[in-house]
Image (cartoon, rainbow, N blue to C red):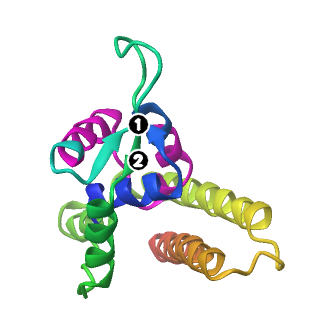
Amino acid sequence: MSLPHAILTALLEKPSSGLELTRRFDKSIGYFWSATHQQIYRELGKLEREGLIRALPTQAPARGQKKEYEVLPQGRAELARWTATPQDPRPLRDPLPLRLRSAAVVGTEGIAEDLARHLALHREQLATYQDIEKRDFPPEKNSEADRLQHAVLRAGIDLERFWVDWLECTLTELD
């Protein structure tokens, strides 16, 4: 996934300012595609120059006024093109398994404590995702868009369950 496409998706869901986008990234998209405030603003400028989005007209003077952006037809077409383009899965690129491989060579000092820290973080993230699921996806919320958004959340839940199970098992094996 790329940041421009994440931004186009978010803006199609709701026209927003850069600040609103960063807040929305922190609460939803950022769980699986993170971006800094600076990256989002830089990408908004590129998307606007490429004619994929535009700043909505404001009635107040522009200086100090936050711009709110919307997706133009060319931006929607680009997002549809990207969405329909097949992509191969990407390999896991997390430093923790690599650190364990390294620990097998240089020793395990400090690794169990860090694994326990990771386990706590993944348990916390899993609980957050499960709370979101309970809050945002009751059984009656069953449109196609709802099911797709829920599928994304379930992927996050399943991934966190994987990490919790793997970390618990790995910690047991280190004892």
**What residue lies at 33% left-to-right and 78% top-to-bottom?**
83
Residue 33 seen from this side: no
Q: Position of residue 106 (x, y in %)?
A: 19, 61
Disc 1 to disc 2: CB gap under 8 Å: yes
Q: Position of residue 127 (x, y in %)?
A: 69, 60
- Per the model, the C-alpha gap separating discs 1 and 2 is 7 Å
Callout 2 amino acid: Glu
**What residue lies at 42% left-to-right and 61% top-to-bottom?**
9
Residue 56 is labelled as: 1
Front-most of 168 and 46?
A: 46
Q: Position of residue 118 (x, y in %)?
A: 48, 56
Residue 54 seen from this side: yes
Relative vertical location of residue 112 with respect to residue 46 in this rendering, above or below: below
> From the viewer's perspective, is 61 left or right of 101?
right
Q: Position of residue 126 (x, y in %)?
A: 63, 63
**What residue lies at 28% left-to-right and 55% top-to-bottom?**
3
The residue at which mark 2 appears reads as: 70
The range drawn in magenta is 22-47
> Could you say which quadrant of the image residue 154 lies in?
bottom right
Front-most of 82 and 175?
A: 82
Tell me if mark 2 has few (under 14), some (14-19) or many (20+) residues whose alpha carbon lies within 10 angstroms of its own. Answer: many
Front-most of 145 and 53?
A: 53
The secondary structure making up most of the magenta span is helix
**What residue lies at 47% left-to-right and 74% top-to-bottom?**
170
Callout 1 amino acid: Leu
Tell me if mark 1 has few (under 14), some (14-19) or many (20+) residues whose alpha carbon lies within 10 angstroms of its own. Answer: some
| 41 inside magenta stretch | yes
| 28 inside magenta stretch | yes
Quarter of the picture containing the N terminus is bottom left
> From the viewer's perspective, is 148 left or right of 108?
right
Determine the secondary structure under disc 2. Answer: strand
